[in-house]
Image: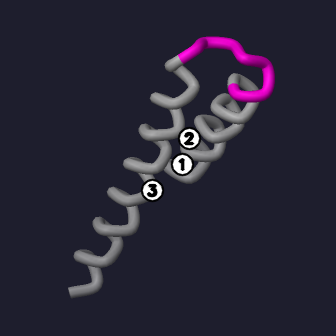
């Protein structure tokens, strides 16, 4: 489910970047997607221990 949200955020970011829609909002979407990926990877790493 988390990866679906990340993909949606990245697609929205790419569309906003290409279409110049949203101004700074497209960069916020990218940052949110990267934070979610990092959080997911760190959480998965802790669960192994």
Q: Position of residue 22 (x, y in %)?
A: 61, 12
Relative vertical location of residue 29 with respect to residue 23 in this rendering, above or below: below
Q: Nearer the viewer, mark 2 or mark 1?
A: 2
The quarter holding residue 13 reads top right
- Give residue 5's mark: 2
> Which of the two residues, 19 or 37, is positioned nearer the viewer here?
19
Relative vertical location of residue 41 with respect to residue 29 in this rendering, above or below: below
Q: Position of residue 18 (x, y in %)?
A: 79, 27
> Which of the two residues, 49 or 29, is positioned nearer the viewer here?
29
Relative vertical location of residue 7 with respect to residue 21 in this rendering, above or below: below
Q: Which residues are magenta?
A: 17-23
Q: CA distance from mark 2 to mark 1?
A: 7 Å
- Give residue 37's mark: 3
Residue that appears at 67% across and 29% down: 12
Q: Position of residue 2 (x, y in %)?
A: 49, 49
- Give residue 1's mark: 1
């Amino acid at each position: 489910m988390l990866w679906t949200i990340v993909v949606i955020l990245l697609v929205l970011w790419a569309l906003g970047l290409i279409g110049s829609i949203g101004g700074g909002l497209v960069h916020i979407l990218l940052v949110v997607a990267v934070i979610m990926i990092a959080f997911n990877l760190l959480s998965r790493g802790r669960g192994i221990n």
